[in-house]
């Protein structure tokens, strides 16, 4: 997976709001440019569409091709195969076999899969020949974080990238905006005899500037 996290102003650090040219749309265009063709970013939706975009691709001959570009067939696939689970460490052949066995329950998918993938494979035949049939897979994921002072409640409610806190899962952007309120909370020891304070009482909360030379040395 190649994951791109867009800069956000969390109120900490040196870099704050991102330059205007850096946006979900411009990064999508740059990734598509590097892939060698326009990728179908809007087929698979994860969380809020303004927050995340995801596209699985087939890497062939130095290019990346979006293999899922039909939202309707993808929706049908989720409906019929949502019960199927697999371990990604098992390898591609075993994963494919897992789904093939489940096609017995939905035999129409054998025909749908053939009519869906064969034309797409034919479309990239020149690259398959040039690459001597060698293929790989790579998924592109872009995360568009929000600035501390520009949180959108609708996007927070639909968040699919959360941080676990003692109050339950919290949107990453909301957590980033109020990080110290979460990570510096005193923790009561189980037997109730002590309280753990993450930050010593004599330590200041002001950010410390670290020069690059200091990091190198």
Image (cartoon, rainbow, N blue to C red):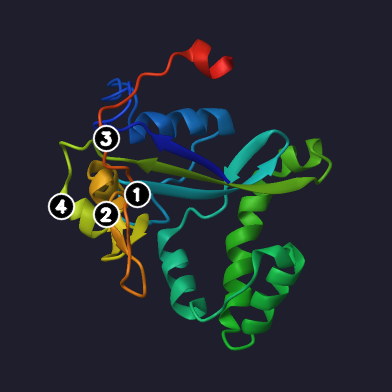
Q: Earlier in the sequence, mark 4 or mark 1?
A: 4
Q: Which residue is mark 2?
A: 185
Q: Is 55 placed left or right of 206 in the picture? A: right
Q: Residues within 10 Å of mark 3 (few under 14, many from 20)?
A: many
Q: Which residue is mark 4?
A: 153
The residue closer to the viewer here, 7 or 38, is: 7
Label pair 3/1, CB-CB below 8 angstroms: no
Q: Which mark is residue 198?
A: 1
Local secondary structure at mark 1: loop
Residue 143, by quadrant, is top left
Q: Which mark is residue 10?
A: 3
Residue 22, percent across and down? Answer: 34, 26
Mark-to-mark CA distance, 3 and 2: 19 Å
Considering only vertical position in the picture, is 83 above or below 206? below
Q: Is 54 placed left or right of 188 in the picture? A: right
Residue 209, percent across and down? Answer: 36, 19
The residue closer to the viewer here, 166 or 193, is: 193
Q: Earlier in the sequence, mark 4 or mark 2?
A: 4
Name which residue lies at 25% across and 33% down.
205
Local secondary structure at mark 3: loop
Q: Which mark is residue 24?
A: none
Q: Earlier in the sequence, mark 3 or mark 2?
A: 3
Name which residue lies at 80% across and 40% down.
129
Local secondary structure at mark 4: helix
Q: Nearer the viewer, mark 3 or mark 4?
A: 3
């Amino acid at each position: 997976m190649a994951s791109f996290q867009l800069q956000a102003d969390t109120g900490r650090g040196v870099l704050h709001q991102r330059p205007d040219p850096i946006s979900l749309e411009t990064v999508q265009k740059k990734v598509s440019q590097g892939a060698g063709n326009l990728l179908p970013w809007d087929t698979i939706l994860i969380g809020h569409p303004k927050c995340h975009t995801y596209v699985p691709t087939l890497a062939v001959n130095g290019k990346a091709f979006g293999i899922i570009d039909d939202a309707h067939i993808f929706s049908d696939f989720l409906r019929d195969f949502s019960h199927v689970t697999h371990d990604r460490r098992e390898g591609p052949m075993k994963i494919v076999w897992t789904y093939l066995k489940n096609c017995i329950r939905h035999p129409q998918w054998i025909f749908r899969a053939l009519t869906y993938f064969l034309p797409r494979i034919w479309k990239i035949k020149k690259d398959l020949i040039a690459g001597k049939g060698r293929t790989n897979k790579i998924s592109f994921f872009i995360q568009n974080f929000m600035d501390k002072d520009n949180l959108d409640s609708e996007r927070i409610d639909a968040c699919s990238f959360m941080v676990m806190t003692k109050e339950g899962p919290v949107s990453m952007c909301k957590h980033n905006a109020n990080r110290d309120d979460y990570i510096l909370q005193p923790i009561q020891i189980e037997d109730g005899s002590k309280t753990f304070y993450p930050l010593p009482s004599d330590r200041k909360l002001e950010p410390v500037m670290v020069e690059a030379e200091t990091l190198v040395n």
